[in-house]
Image (cartoon, rainbow, N blue to C red):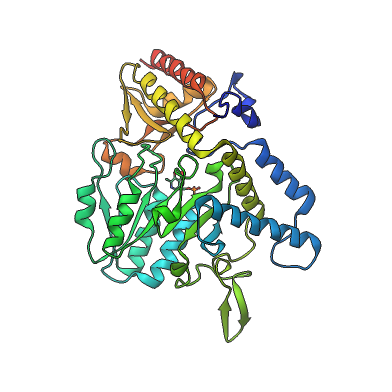
Amino acid sequence: MPNFNTIRNDFPLLAREIHGKPLVYLDSGATTQKPQAVIDKINYFYTQINSNIHRAVHHLSSLSTEEYEASRQTVANFINAKSTAEIIFTKGTTDAINLVAFSFGEKFINEGDEILISEIEHHSNIVPWQLLCERKKAILKVIPVDDNADIIMEEFVKRLSAKTKLVAIAQVSNAFGTIHPIKEIIKKAHKIGAKVLIDGAQGIQHLKTDVQELDCDFYAFSGHKIYAENGIGVLYGKEELLAQMPPYQGGGDMIAQVTFTGTTYAELPLKFEAGTSNYVGAASIAESIRYISEIGLENIEKYENELLAYAEEKLLKIEGLKIYGTAQQKSSAISFMIKDIHPMDAGMILDKLGIAVRTGSHCVQPGMLRFGLTGTIRASLAFYNNKADIDALYNGLLKVKMMLS
Ligand code: PLP
């Protein structure tokens, strides 16, 4: 078992102070801090090998291209994709979902078809489907959750029909921490011929993920949530599906040949990578994968689960505090309210104490509404957090209560 007490020393930013207080960073669901290894990799790229990829015959270009394609292989291995043809670099999860909504939508969605999402999806896994439904006169259906923020499986099954073409659901809810039973969902959806997209933005960094074992058709995640750079993400798609889908955007790199009478497209995965990709970002993902693989995702999961249990137990000792999201299986995020205290006020006082939490709707407005809320306070954990961070949050919240009650 790695020493999780010293691991935070790998993350330089965590050593800084905020308003003269040691930083307690509990907003990793929004974005993660970066380990020195990733920062060094980005530095190495720009000081040693930077050049545009797939373009030139000169030495730097081939070094950059080699790194980029090796990064693709690292990602493929990490999620156990069959081949690198199935790994498309995007700008992030949002970009990956929009790619599928546009391209899969163009090819496979017709008037009257149905797309299913859960009631607690991130806006990134709602709005692209709404836009697609508008374009194609298709129907977006919502699977309700119960009072714990667990998906109601019978309601899901009720909504499945021959019209269902796609189910799009998060692996882990960013607002409530629910780990959705995606394997079961995928199995049930496949039985009636529907495809499944998993929004892995909050899953990939916490849970060991094997796309072949899950048998999902698409899987999306963001670099910045897995200790790598922003502006880079991944879309995994089954090759036989991606091969049938039209390009999402046109431009350089995604073509085989261009003439004024017509254009042919590059093979997968480049068909979906128009323009200069964020190749440095891709290398940063590969480095972060190497870094967390050394720690071991099983170890990370175990440690984070223990910390989550400690945090929930501790926070519930505060009178008037209610946790929203008490699913059977949870990861990382604790959403809560304190009686008669506005989340924003709490967030501002915590900030003055050096404690960073997220307040607001967490880009999950419909999910908040389900619980009669417009927002919550959210503490989201990473493996660089420890019990002292939770204790600081607890003490900070007592101060918030004292000041605002
Ligand atoms: N899906 C979920 C569950 C998220 O938590 C987020 C970001 O918080 C996204 C999608 C969007 O990710 P990005 O902004 O990196 O595209």
Question: In percent of the image, x 61 and y 37: which residue is there?
Answer: 34
Task: Give the farthest residue toward the front.
Answer: 1
Whole-percent x, y for residue 226 in the image = 54, 42
Task: Give the farthest residue toward the top.
Answer: 402
The quarter of the displayed image where residue 130 is located: bottom left
Question: In percent of the image, x 49 and y 20: which residue is there?
Answer: 387
Q: Quadrant of the N terminus?
A: top right
- State left or right for residue 63 relative to residue 394: right
For residue 327, say whether it is visible: yes
Of 276 and 327, which appears nearest the observer?
Answer: 327
Residue 296 vertical position relative to residue 337 in the rendered view, above or below = below
Question: In percent of the image, x 57 and y 39: which residue is there?
Answer: 292
The quarter of the displayed image where residue 177 is located: top left
Task: Give the farthest residue toward the bottom.
Answer: 261
Of 356 and 343, which appears nearest the observer?
Answer: 356
Whole-percent x, y for residue 126 in the image = 36, 53
Whole-percent x, y for residue 303 in the image = 48, 29
Whole-percent x, y for residue 251 in the image = 60, 70
